Amino acid sequence: MPSQIVEVASSVGLHARPASIFVKSVVKTGLQIKIGKPGNASLNAASLLSVLALGIKCGEKVEIVVPDDAPDAELVLDELVKIITTNFDEIK
Amino acid sequence: MKLNEMKLTGIGVSPGVTYGPLHFISKPKFEKPISVSLQKIFAGLNIVAEYLEDQSKLVTLDVAKEVIEAQSMIARDPELFETFKTYFPATGDVSDARDSIRLCFAGFKDSLKKIGGYFAERVSDIEEIEQLLFHVLTDLPITQTLITHECVVAAEDLSPAETANMNLSFVKGIFVAKGGPTSHTAIVARNLGIPAVVGCGNVKVISESTSVLIDGRSGNIFLDPEINLVNELVKKEKNYQKKLLAIKGIGQLKDKTKIELLANAGNHADAVNAHSMGAEGIGLFRTELLYLSQNIAPSISEQVNLYSKIFNDFNSKKVIVRTLDAGSDKPLPFLNVEKEENPALGVRGWRLFRDHKNVISDQIKAISIATENSSCDVWVMAPMIDTVKEVREFVELARSFGLKKVGVMIETPAAAILADKIFAEVDFASLGTNDLTQYVMAADRLDSRLSDLTNTWHPSVLRMIQIAGSYAKKMNKPLGVCGEAASDPLLAAVLIGLGVTSLSMSPYSIREVKGFLSTLSMNKCVEVASEIVRCADYDQAMNLARKALI
């Protein structure tokens, strides 16, 4: 399954705006995307509560897994990685 | 007075007169069983989510919009739904669903609490959703909890989380049944210049009123007042403000004794505000903001940048920098402070130096570099000092970086009682009256049930201040106040009578205090203060001050 381990760029961590934007994008895909600490991507990425409860701070890594059978799985993964590696606090 | 007009009186904690629609934040306890099915809960969550989505469209403030949007996502969270499925049967009513509903939310709240910092702040968002769901399930209107229009907010009590959640740009005034002058609500209101009254007793009667007039100076609250009264008080307030604005120059008593009036600030915006409100300098520059939610300590150059910015705002004036005042009550991830049973009594303030010498000495280094690059009169002080040994540690470190004016905070009874020995080592001291009150009275200042105890007017606290004040006078050392007490004009006058030489407060309080002090002589302050410390309790002390000074 396409997966990638990425470092969280936002200075507040995977929280507040970055977390909301990420989860919204996941929900939009309608896919069973998983997230978690590297090697343990078992949580529902469409759940803001689960994403927050990971407690990922700036500079820490997460793993994202997109199901194989998804059309454009690689593209979806790229899109989500881009969100995680953007520092939204700077853009603001 | 109109027939349906009602008057309540509390403690005015943030001056100003305001009139507006009443927004009563009710927090029903839901003491009766709630009989519902899983389907009904899901439908309820859907109503909550829709409500929040509507609200997020109405709110104009970006930050509030984001929070409400995130809340609506939580109300639709698939994992929350999964959790409910494990606690409830697939069909049929549960005779009392309250505990199970609370448990479903508790797991998520606990894991965020455990992470701490910014993440833990989200717990209150979840609590609000829980509260909204209970409202829906018991057919109570849910339009009350969120503020989307200008109003005066009333509540039984407001927790720090609740005030943080409020869209304060819409709040024209606040009054709560519980709480004292150092309560969180009072501090927030003063810092934002929002008129506020606390401790006004029973607010149940107000829930049926629609408009309210509050006077944050006298502590009077009028429910559904006649428009004549509104006009009269608003006009009176305007005239008073005009009078205050007319008092130019620096802070001084009637007899020209100078009392430095400084501002508390935590960032550039505060400093700009302080400037425009006529502060003669910064009496408490809180440096914690720079450290909050950081994974690693901010670098020396980052710190120099921020400090320089503030120093430039107050060119050639005085700025008193307080070194890092964090600890397990204000945890910072990189300090790895263990969870403590009594954080207020734990490793906080200067005590961090025990295990984090580099963090503290880097900060002092950054302050000294920023000082060299500016024309500001920079003073530096350490918080949470108990012993002369700690004082010497700090003074030695600060002087080794070339800082000229070095002092400490007096916020523990230990330091106040030993003030002569402490003054022998330092150039100045500043009374942190909030913590000093909490420690003298042995009462947690965050616990609203104890707000009657955490009041600086208690003669025990004032006697403690008297000890420090008399040594300051004897040894001719400046003694400031940087707690909430400085922004209460009456209390400020008493503190001056006890030997305090400068006051640092929220910028919005400066004019008020300046105006009041200009009506009093030093002799009067000393005379009244010496009577006040002989009072038996705080009511008596406050009343005596009111009679003697106003």
Image (spheres, coloured by chain):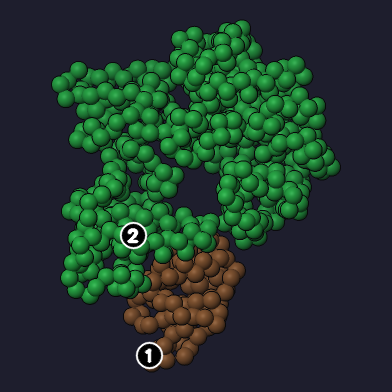
Chain colours: A brown, B green
- Mark 1 is surrounded, within 10 Å at the Cα level, by few (under 14), some (14 to 19) or many (20 or more) other residues, namely few
Residue B181 coordinates in the image, percent (x, y): 46, 29
- Mark 2 belongs to which amino acid? Arg
Furthest residue toward bottom:
A69
Where does label 2 land, which residue? B102
Q: Residue at x 36, y 55 (%)?
A: B127
- The residue located at (33%, 29%) in the rendering is B201
In front: label 1 or label 2: 2
Residue A26 seen: yes
Q: Position of residue B288 (x, y in %)?
A: 61, 47
Q: Residue at x 62, y 43 (%)?
A: B345
Check the image and name the residue furthest to the left: B3
| Viewer-proximal residue among B31 and B225 | B31
Query: Mark on residue B518?
Result: none
Position of residue B233 relative to residue B155, above or below, is above
In this orientation, which residue lies closer to the viewer: B359 or B260?
A: B359
Q: Secondary structure at mark 2?
A: helix
| Image-based side of A75 in relation to B128, left or right | right
Residue corresponding to mark 1 = A71
| Number of numbered discs overlaid on the protein picture | 2
Q: Are marks 1 and 2 in contact (CB under 8 Å)?
A: no
What x and y, as percent, mark residue B417?
Answer: 70, 26
Q: For mark 2, name the chain.
A: B
Residue B188 visible in the snapshot: no
Answer with the quarter of the image where residue B270 lies: top right
**Distance Cα–Cα, label 1 vs label 2:** 40 Å
Type of the residue with mark 1: Pro
